[in-house]
Amino acid sequence: MKTFFRALAGCAAFAALFALIVLLANTYLIQTDTITALTLREMQAREDIELAFVGSSVVRDHFNVQLITEKTGLTAFNVTVPCASMPANIALTKELYRTNSPQWVVLVVEPYTFQTPREDTEAEYKLMPFLSDWKNRLEYYLRLCDEDGYYLDRLFIFREFGVKSLRDIAKTVGLRHWPEETYALLQPSMDPTVSYQGSGFLRHTTDERADDLVRKSVFREYTGYYYELFDKSKAELLEYKALCESHGSNLLILLSPNLAAHALAEPGFLEYGESLMRFCRDNGIACFNFLFARPEFMPSLDGYYFDLYHMVGEGADILSDAFCRFFRLYTSGEDVTSLFYENSAAYLESIDEITNAWVTQYDSSCAWNLAWDQDEAAVTAAAQTQDVFMADCNRGTLVTPEYRFVRVEPDGSETILQDYSTETLYLCAPGELDGQTLRLYARPQGQEDAQPDWFELTVGETSCATPGALAHSSSS
């Protein structure tokens, strides 16, 4: 019997030692996201947060809390980690409540938040080491693993997100224990176009814009599916509501504005938002869609995006100012519904432009690329004897596009193959354009003076346009 208990004690000691080693490795032998570390360490040292914005990098980059504090009179803070979805939002908010009692919690979400109940491992890798309560850590870990079953991957963070040099260890240790001093040392070697402004706000000052990315990658898919919130997402939203209520906070959910091209191109983008709005309405949760903001309330922010998901500081200022005007009206009991389009149909009708266009060469393996107004049987028949090139674009529902097909010559000049018309197809003899550059121009009918959108295809390199904006990935 003594031998048994001695063996049991030895196993317990080994398990405890193993757990300690894993804990230390997951704390110090991992890479650390600088801005996440600064944000969470600052939040944990604060007790004065009155207005908390919770969410992914769209919170970090798009809500100028200094401006919001000034205009609302409430001390604002961005509680954020890249790629956060509902599991991380819940864990973040529990951490917030350990030292703060905000009057308002603004949960900022996107349609991407609800494309899947599974959360990207990047969010966990950046957040988990900074959760100070073991119970919150365990609940967050089990919630994640219950969905994807990645028990070992999510437990051993240092395996996937481990340090690669002694410099990484020094950075991790410094950001955990001396965050401000470490940031001052790191800043000279960091991207000069970004700066941490404090209170969880990261300001971007780059001259880069997303126009080229939109033109090259945001193509529309035609799936025909209906998109509804997952049951798990609904349960987590109700859990989040109860969490805020139990701490005496007023909850407000905002759907973040986004590039219009996403709303026009991505399957489910608008449907997930509509589903969220219905769910919140049925469950007594205040929810507003800032993508549907009317231009007299907030102008289009498309020109401020430096990538497909994030804006420069000027865009953040405009959004933050609009939020403050909305918030003052809302908290004073005013009707704010007139600030937004009523639904997706009204929003789509309001878009009087073409955001981007593309041309693809038809082949049977990518028949899904046919636009709604293209007859598959007719296109397939034409493709038996000719090369078929198909034009399409992202546009408002009331916009009728006109297309021009041109061949770009070696000296850069253009030869018009088919001038502006509503015809979406260009047909030519088989192989006639192989190896050449086909350029498409698109403009709204009736707007002959409008700057046309354009797209180039090197014929023979690829036949199917591959949607490039459908995965949020680590953009958050």
Image (cartoon, rainbow, N blue to C red):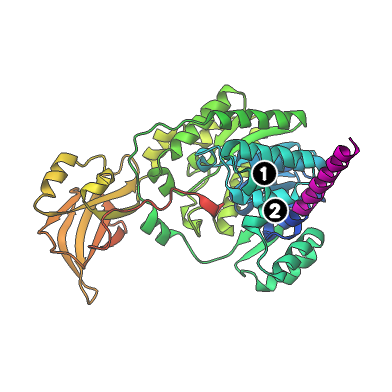
Q: Is residue 323 above or below residue 288?
A: below
Cα–Cα span, label 1 and label 2: 9 Å
Could you tell me the amino acid type at mark 2? Gly
* Between 273 and 134, the one nearer to me in the picture: 134
Mark 2, Cα crowd under 10 Å, few <14 / some 14-19 / many 20+, is many
Residue 156 in view, yes or no: yes
Q: Can you identify the residue that label 1 sits on?
A: 53
On residue 200, the disc is 2
Left or right side of 368 for 270:
right
Give the structural element (helix, strand or loop) at label 1.
Answer: strand
> Over which residues does the magenta segment extend?
1-23
Residue 320 falls within the magenta-colored stretch: no
| Farthest residue, direction right | 2
- Marks 1 and 2 close (CB-CB < 8 Å): yes
- Chief secondary structure of the magenta span? helix
| Residue visible at 66% across and 64% down in the picture | 195
x and y percentages locating residue 474 in the rendered image: 55, 53
Q: Is residue 46 above or below residue 227?
A: below
Residue 16 falls within the magenta-colored stretch: yes
Could you tell me the amino acid type at mark 1? Phe
Give the structural element (helix, strand or loop) at label 2.
Answer: loop
